[in-house]
Image (cartoon, grey):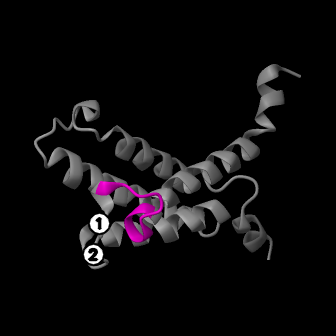
Amino acid sequence: MSTNNQLTQYQPYALGLLRIVTGYMFIMHGMTKLFQIPYIEMFANVPLGSMFGAAGIIELIGGALIILGLFTRPVAFILSGQMAAAYFIGHVADGGNFLMPILNSGELAVQWCFTFLFFFVAGSGAFALDNLRNKA
């Protein structure tokens, strides 16, 4: 058996761990916007009805669903779109070069956009409630 075939058996677990860590990192952005935990001055006192408030709600709920691996594909599609919008509205609109995210501090939004797009295509991997739903 080749090394490639031996490693392939671990793909669902690697995908599941990537999903959980990504969801955790994403949920922290929602927590800071909605509850100031952890406190970041830029997101202090975000009105719930503002664009940042709506983003915080999507990040909190979407991040939790991603961690659980519940409705992973549709949630990942929505989160990918949110991150694309965040990039163009929050980073490029401020005069940043859209082909050089490092220059407009948008590299994280781009990375998340494509990570969630990957989850949309690849699914949830191991450790996901979607796996239980699909068996039922």
Query: Looking at the figure, which quarter contains the C terminus?
Result: bottom right
Instruction: Reply yes or no: does residue 35 show up in magenta.
Output: yes
Q: Give the range drawn in magenta.
A: 32-41
Q: Residue at 73% across / 73% down in the picture?
A: 133
User: Badge 1: how crowded within 10 Å, few (<14), some, or many (20+)?
Assistant: some
The residue singled out by tag 2 in the image is 47
Residue 132 place in picture, x, y as percent: 78, 70
Name the outermost residue toward the left.
95
In this rendering, which labeled residue sits more in front, label 1 or label 2? Answer: 2
Residue 56 or residue 70, whichever sits in front:
56
Residue 43 can be seen, yes or no: yes
Residue 25 place in picture, x, y as percent: 53, 51
Disc 1 marks a residue whose amino acid type is Phe
Disc 2 marks a residue whose amino acid type is Pro
Residue 113 or residue 96, whichever sits in front:
96
Q: Residue at 51% across / 71% down in the picture?
A: 61
Whichever of labels 1 and 2 marks the residue nearer the N terminus, that label is 2
Instruction: Reply yes or no: does residue 71 show up in magenta.
Output: no
Q: Are marks 1 and 2 in contact (CB under 8 Å)?
A: yes
Regarding mark 2 in the picture, which secondary structure is present there? loop
- Above or below, 49 against 42 in this view is below
The answer to which quarter of the image holds residue 97 is top left
- Alpha carbon distance from label 1 to label 2: 8 Å
The residue singled out by tag 1 in the image is 52
Q: Residue at 42% across / 41% down in the picture?
A: 111
Name the outermost residue toward the right.
1
Q: Residue at 36% across / 43% down in the picture?
A: 110
